[in-house]
Image (tube, rainbow, N blue to C red):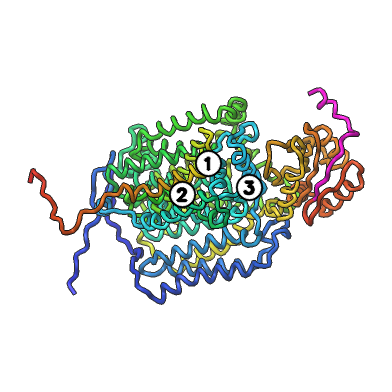
């Protein structure tokens, strides 16, 4: 079997005020696969929570869904924009951003004297769907890449 | 001697590298199964333990010794996998999860009720916001930073429940599981050696005895702290920028002296490469930092100060490219203080800044007052001091070993030292040393790892492996002693909780809730409608829990009707802290029942509620004057 040369993934690059050895290759190609997977679970969970809130269903499942959406929902969508390849970082950011946004949302609703389950669920669900809605479709493989005018 | 400009040479690493193989192998299967079996074994060994039997040394008195055997076996299994040529991430991750379950989930498994009386006050604060739709800063100082309680109230609304109380039992376990990935990200910045983050993570969870991970604003804010530090160190750190000129002169001078003492020719930055990011990614990450900091500012007093100091110190030493960010942080912090927390600071400037520079007073509040305990419980406090001192001594040793290897980790050192600057500020209710220990622990764990493995060249040989396993095994009982040493009075039994709930149901508005000790979780609901009064004790005088003194307290209290709640957590605190005899609960109950002004209206195994008839009493002269 032919041995493939390893891809050089590090280089010294100018960054900020100093020189750093950075993983440029990973930086350019990065996506957030873990956030994508969690978001795929969070989307139906947030829809289910919305439905249960609208119907005012009293159930332990609703409590579990609320906890999960508060801790993972919005973050799982927003972290995908960061395209960080580091799974641990993605997971931590998902939780931190979700809880931080929940606090800011709660404070905003408190300020406007509108602490209301439906508004909260609506906002959280919208945030959870933000990345899938705004995502640009990848270019089809068959379509040739247009050359730049300068070339 | 240069501390800044040398480019790190490629490592002559003998350290193992992480593997990404997904193939099934027997070693991986055993590696994944072993931690699960050890957790099951550990939980089974303590299934019969009763936290209410905890004595002056806390929960360790009721733990089965086999439990500590399982902790030792987990450490041995962890080290065995660390010694392999390629590090198996899922297997090592499973060991860390198992460690968290054994150390931070075992007590929830035993107690079946959320521990810590203060948790019940936090439930009450959330209940108030949920019921009224507003905050009440005069009710409790914590209401000036209501972000956490408002979010909890909103969560209750969305979940369709009055309180998420039953789910709080597992809060410490869940929060520690949440911390783990962020801690891993932070520890990964320390070195190119793939073993360092795992060992540091293992040490962190074995040493994290402070116990601020219950349902509380500080627990959530520690998550924000870790996220913030992880982003800054992983994406915005710069190790090779020249120090500012005045600091560089001092640094070079210190570098020469240290280099001569340690016989090191030159120092190189020791950190791992930062994560590559594009301009768009960095912009988004800065925005995320701002959002997280804003949430932190609204929900906790102390954490934003730690974060502001941390980033400012990095900027001053040019260890981050976020040069303007401290300004934004300061604007957010002072804007909120000036607007959201005005109700607190306008009347408490002395409390906020009065302790500034008074290190002696801060030391007395944080250390001196804690050793004034009249029982063998004092050994728990000594054990805590010993552990904290041991951690800091090992940190210093790790730093020296790292320097001897020619590596300097300025950003990590900043992270370790900066929390200590808060010590010069205020006592924070005698808890500031706990917070300093907690905030510096992630960095301390890294330096302790460097004491074991200062460079990639060193192998985790038999000697080092045995030392690590021994330390981790001994940390099992030490953790239990320091973390759960207060369990005799921090444990809230189901009967305690039910009595407090019953009293909140029974008592009409404007009632007095009398207790003989402040260690009680009785502020569960309708807390603004009651006056919570603790029977006062004169400083320097013998403790007075006589029926007459309790009765006079009820007479002097501002409300219409008075109720006395006696509960297990109060009694345990009095017995342990003030050395009262074991018969104290029976004695005081007998005396109260014998008095015609006290009527027993509720009792269970751990608690009693008395209605107090104050019609025959006359208020004390000093109360009349007010």
Element class at badge 3 = helix
The reply to whether residue B210 is in sight is: no
Q: Can you say whether B11 is above or below B316 in the image?
A: below
- Mark number displayed over residue B551: none
Q: Quickly name the residue at label 2.
A: B443
Label 3: chain? B
Label 2: chain? B
Q: Which segment is the magenta one?
A: B608-626
Q: On the same chain: label 2 and label 1?
A: no
- The residue located at (29%, 51%) in the rendering is B8
Magenta stretch holds residue B283: no
- Mark number displayed over residue B119: 3
The reply to whether dot 2 and dot 1 touch (C-beta < 8 Å) is no
- Mark number displayed over residue A116: 1
Label 1: chain? A
The reply to whether dot 3 and dot 2 touch (C-beta < 8 Å) is no
Return the residue nearer the eye: B354 or A41. A41
What separation in Å lies between label 3 and label 2 (alpha carbons)?
Answer: 28 Å
Which quadrant: the C terminus of chain B? top right
């Amino acid at each position: 079997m032919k041995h493939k040369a390893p891809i050089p993934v590090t280089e010294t690059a100018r960054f900020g005020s100093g020189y750093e050895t950075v993983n440029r290759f990973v930086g350019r190609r990065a996506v957030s696969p873990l956030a994508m997977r969690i978001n795929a679970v969070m989307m139906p969970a947030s829809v289910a929570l919305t439905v249960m809130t609208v119907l005012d269903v009293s159930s332990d499942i609703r409590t579990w869904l609320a906890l999960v959406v508060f801790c993972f929902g919005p973050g799982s969508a927003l972290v995908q924009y960061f395209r960080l390849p580091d799974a641990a970082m993605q997971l931590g950011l998902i939780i931190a951003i979700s809880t931080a946004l929940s606090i800011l949302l709660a404070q905003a609703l408190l300020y406007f004297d509108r602490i209301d389950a439906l508004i909260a669920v609506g906002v959280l669900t919208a945030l959870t769907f933000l990345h899938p809605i705004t995502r640009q479709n990848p270019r089809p493989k068959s379509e040739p890449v247009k050359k730049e005018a300068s070339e | 001697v240069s501390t800044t400009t040398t480019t790190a040479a490629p490592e002559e690493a003998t350290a193992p590298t992480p593997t990404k193989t997904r193939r099934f192998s027997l070693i991986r299967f055993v590696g994944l199964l072993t931690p699960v079996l050890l957790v099951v074994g550990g939980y089974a060994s303590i299934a019969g333990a009763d936290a209410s039997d905890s004595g002056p040394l806390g929960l360790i008195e009721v733990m089965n010794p086999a439990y500590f055997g399982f902790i030792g076996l987990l450490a041995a299994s962890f080290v065995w996998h660390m010694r392999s040529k390629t590090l198996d991430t899922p297997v090592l991750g499973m060991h860390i999860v198992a460690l968290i379950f054994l150390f931070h989930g075992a007590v929830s498994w035993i107690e079946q009720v959320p521990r810590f009386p203060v948790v019940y006050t936090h439930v009450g604060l959330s209940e108030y916001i949920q019921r009224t739709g507003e905050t009440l800063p005069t009710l409790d100082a914590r209401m000036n930073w209501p972000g956490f309680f408002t979010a909890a109230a909103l969560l209750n609304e969305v979940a369709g429940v009055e309180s998420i109380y039953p789910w709080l039992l597992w809060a410490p376990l869940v929060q520690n599981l949440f911390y783990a990935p962020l801690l891993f990200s932070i520890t990964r910045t320390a070195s190119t050696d793939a073993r360092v983050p795992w060992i540091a993570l293992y040490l962190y969870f074995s040493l994290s005895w402070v116990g601020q991970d219950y349902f509380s604003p500080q627990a959530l804010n520690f998550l924000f702290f870790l996220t913030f530090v992880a982003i800054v160190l992983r994406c915005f750190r710069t190790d090779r920028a020249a120090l500012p000129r005045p600091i560089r002169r001092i640094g070079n001078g210190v570098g020469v002296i240290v280099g001569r003492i340690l016989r090191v020719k030159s120092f190189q930055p020791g950190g791992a490469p930062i994560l590559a990011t594009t301009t768009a990614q960095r912009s988004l990450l800065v925005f995320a930092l701002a959002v997280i900091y804003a949430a932190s500012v609204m929900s906790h007093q102390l954490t934003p100060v730690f974060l502001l100091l941390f980033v400012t110190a990095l900027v001053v030493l040019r260890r981050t490219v976020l040069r303007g960010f401290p300004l934004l942080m300061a604007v957010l912090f002072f804007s909120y203080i000036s607007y959201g927390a005005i109700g607190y600071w306008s009347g408490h400037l002395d409390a906020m800044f009065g302790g500034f520079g008074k290190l002696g007073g801060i030391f007395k509040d944080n250390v001196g007052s804690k050793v004034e305990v009249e029982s063998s419980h004092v050994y728990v406090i000594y054990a805590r001091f010993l552990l904290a001192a041991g951690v800091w001594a090992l940190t210093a040793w790790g730093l020296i070993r790292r320097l001897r290897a020619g590596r300097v980790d300025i950003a990590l050192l900043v992270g370790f030292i900066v929390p200590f600057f808060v010590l010069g500020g205020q006592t924070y209710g005698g808890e500031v040393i706990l917070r300093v220990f907690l905030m510096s622990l992630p960095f301390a764990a890294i330096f302790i790892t460097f004491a074991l493995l200062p460079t990639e060249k060193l192998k985790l040989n038999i000697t080092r492996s045995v030392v690590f396993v021994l330390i981790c095994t001994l940390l099992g009982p030490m953790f239990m002693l320091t973390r759960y040493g207060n369990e005799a009075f921090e444990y809230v039994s189901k009967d305690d909780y039910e009595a407090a709930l019953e009293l909140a149901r029974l008592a009409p508005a404007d009632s007095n809730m009398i207790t003989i000790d402040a260690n009680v979780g009785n502020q569960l609901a309708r807390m603004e409608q009651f006056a919570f009064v603790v029977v006062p004790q004169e400083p320097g005088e013998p403790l007075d829990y006589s029926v007459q003194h309790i009765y006079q307290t009820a007479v002097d209290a501002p409300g219409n009707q008075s109720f006395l709640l006696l509960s297990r957590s109060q009694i345990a605190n009095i017995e342990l802290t003030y050395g009262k005899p074991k018969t104290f609960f029976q004695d005081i109950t007998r005396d109260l029942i014998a008095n015609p002004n006290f009527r027993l209206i509720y009792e269970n195994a751990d608690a009693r509620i008395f209605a107090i008839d104050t019609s025959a009493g006359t208020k004390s002269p000093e109360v009349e004057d007010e």
